[in-house]
Amino acid sequence: MLGGMGPAATAEFMRLLAERSPASCDQEHATVYVLSDPQIPDRSSAIVGKGEDPTARLRSGLTTLVRWGAGLLAVPCNTAHYFIDRFRGDLPVPLVHIVEETVAAAAGLSPGGAWLAGTLGTIKTGLFQAEAERLGYQFLLPPEDALGEVQRVIDTVKGGDRRAGGMLLRRIMDDLWSARDIPLCMACTELPLAYDASGLPADRAVSSLEALSDACVRALYAPAES
C-alpha cells in the first residue's frame, strides 16, 4: 500500500483493512507492505499548475512495493489516481482502483445519484464524473463556494483537527441536503475522517476509504474462499 497522502487517511485505511478482513487470528490476515511517503508532491497543486508533478514519485513508490513482494497494489488517495492512470497499464501486478470502487459503491447505495465532494484537483480532473458516466450513474456537484469549503475541510483534517473539519462538513451537508436529499460520495480520503467526527448519519455517505478496503478484502480473500 502506497500511502502518506495523508498519513491519517493511511492509518485509517489500515484499520479498516484489518477490521473488515475475515480473519480469526493474526496468521489469517494478509501480509501488507506499507510505504507511507508524505513527501510525494501535493496532487491537487500539481493539477492546477501550482506544484511539482508527483508522477515519478508515485511510480517509484509502487514499483518499490512490487520489488518488496506485493502482489496487489492500493493507494488510499483519490487525486493520486489521475497521475497513476498514466502508467497503470505498466504495473506488473493489479492495482485496486479507488475511484472505480467508490463510484460502484455509490451506485450501490443510491442508484438515483449522489453529491460528489473531493479536493478541487480531483473535481477538476473529472475522474469521478467520467467513471460515473461509464456506469450510467449521476453525480451532482456542489456550488463552487461549497467546493471551496470542502477543500477547507480536507485541509483542516490534514492539519490534524478532525473535529473542526467535521463541524464545517456538517454545515456544508445541511445546505446540500436542503437542496437535494441524496447521499454524499466522499472522493477524498480525508473526508471520511471529518464525516466520522461530524455526527452525520453513517448511512448517508459513501467513504472512498471503505470502498477501497472492501475491494482489497474481496481481492485478497475471495480466491481462498472459492
Image (spheres, grey):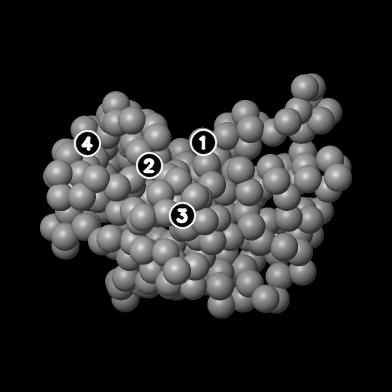
Q: Quadrant of the C terminus?
A: top right
Q: Is residue 41 left or right of residue 98?
A: left
* Residue at image location 20% in from the left, 44% down from the top: 177
Q: Return the residue at label 3.
A: 107
Question: SS of the residue at dot 3?
Answer: helix
Query: What is the three-letter code of the residue carrying label 3?
Result: Ala
Residue under label 2: 205
In this rendering, the label closer to the viewer, 4 or 2: 2
Q: Are marks 2 and 1 in contact (CB under 8 Å)?
A: no
- Tell me if mark 4 has few (under 14), some (14-19) or many (20+) residues whose alpha carbon lies within 10 angstroms of its own: some
- State the residue position of label 1: 12
Distance in Å between CA atoms under marks 1 and 4: 20 Å
Q: Is residue 93 left or right of residue 112?
A: right
* Residue ID for mark 4: 170
Q: Secondary structure at mark 1?
A: helix
Q: Which badge, 1 or 4, is on the more N-terminal residue? A: 1
Alpha carbon separation for disc pair 2 and 1: 17 Å
* Mark 2: few/some/many CA within 10 Å (<14, 14-19, 20+): many
Which comes sooner in the sequence, label 1 or label 3? 1
Q: Is residue 186 above or below residue 59?
A: above
Q: Position of residue 127 (x, y in %)?
A: 43, 69
Badge 1: residue crowd in 10 Å (few <14, some 14–19, many ≥20): some
Q: Is residue 208 visible?
A: yes
Residue drawn 37% across and 72% down? Answer: 125
Q: Amino acid at mark 2?
A: Ala
Residue 182 in the image: x percent, y percent? 29, 47
Dot in front, 2 or 3: 3
